[in-house]
Amino acid sequence: MKLAALLLAAFASAGCGRYAEFTLPPPEGPARDVRWTWTEREGVALDAGAVDTLNPSVVRRDGRHWNYFSVYDGQTWHTDLASSPDGGVTWQREGRVLSPIAETWENRYIAANGHAALRGGEVFYWYQAGPKGATRIGLARSRDGRSFARVTEPVLDLGPRGSWDEVSIGDPYAVEVNGTWYLYYLGQDRARRQRLGVARSTDGVRWEKLRTNPVLEMGVDGAFDEQGLGEPAVWASDGWYWMLYTGRDRREVRRMGLARSRDGVRWERVPPTIAGGQAWNAKVVCDPAVEVTAEGVRVWYGGGDAASPDENLHGKIGFAMLTRER
């Protein structure tokens, strides 16, 4: 397929740095004092047989669940697709949907680690691309969920010199509230600190970053997220916005933390801290994707048994439930 057929023309200002002060609209209902319990399903939910299978992003469409996940082949991160007819319990691989286009801004390392969401029957997929250590966030769109057209330039770019996200950004996760997208993402500065911020957009292409970013800082010395945090997943329930996120300690062991907020900007950490409970995810629990149900929150997540900064984790995808304590 010719390059021109793969690319979707973008607004000239798509990657420009714009800033604003904002909060998210209040979540519905009174704020309840909810405590969550994490329960893992035994075994692996999805393993593509690659060096790493990670970063699930799950949407429900046409009576099935669709999982846009990342695979690492030893050199490059790609986005693959799997589908499930039984609510995300078992998965059937559907093939590859994105690989980096080397002659563009995407470079050769990655076109993956993304988040899929639906609007008007169309799949919006924000993804991470660019040279290793200097990635940005792009957007690809699809009517059928399989063939994607990419915006030609990054839709979210690096911050200015000296900013909290001047070196690299990634880990996008978008939620739509009252017709506006709010994109939570990781930013890295020149001191290699990795923290979380938020941006907003009405079209998913042109973004305004929160002027007071970051919204969640690294943990204190000795905390599970003392070395950095990323990979947010955000949802609203019980009068709160909730965020699952990945934290790294100095040994590169990864666990997930939970935070809550009334406005989507000011966050407080709450229990539990989530570690892997099986051999295959003993060193790494990361990359949450969530679906809110009446029973609780369904979570697909990445895991591995090797502590490593970026890849070579022996990564696989698991499934768990967050349920409200009675």
Image (cartoon, helix red, strand yellow):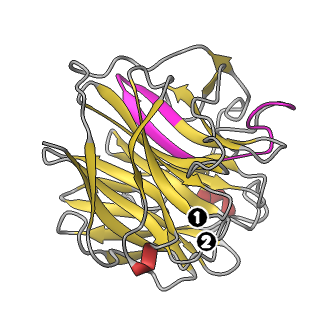
Q: Which residues are magenta?
A: 161-183
Q: Which residue is mark 1?
A: 253
Query: What percent of the width, then of the height, locates residue 301?
Result: 41, 62
Specify whether residue 277 is painted magenta. Answer: no
Residue 71: mark: none
Q: Is residue 114 above or below residue 215?
A: below
For the residue carrying disc 2, how many other residues have a C-alpha within 10 Å: few (<14), some (14-19), or many (20+)? some
Point 71% across, 29% down: residue: 13
Q: CA distance from mark 1 to mark 2?
A: 5 Å
Point 13% across, 44% down: residue: 294
Q: Secondary structure at mark 1?
A: loop
Query: What percent of the width, then of the height, locates residue 153?
Result: 70, 45
Question: What secondary structure do most residues of the magenta stretch adopt?
Answer: strand
* Mark 1 residue type: Val
The answer to whether any part of residue 151 appears in the image is no
* Mark 2 residue type: Ala
Query: Of all residues shown, which one is farthest toward the right?
Result: 161
Q: Which residue is mark 2?
A: 307
Q: Secondary structure at mark 2?
A: loop
Query: Of all residues shown, which one is farthest toward the top?
Result: 21
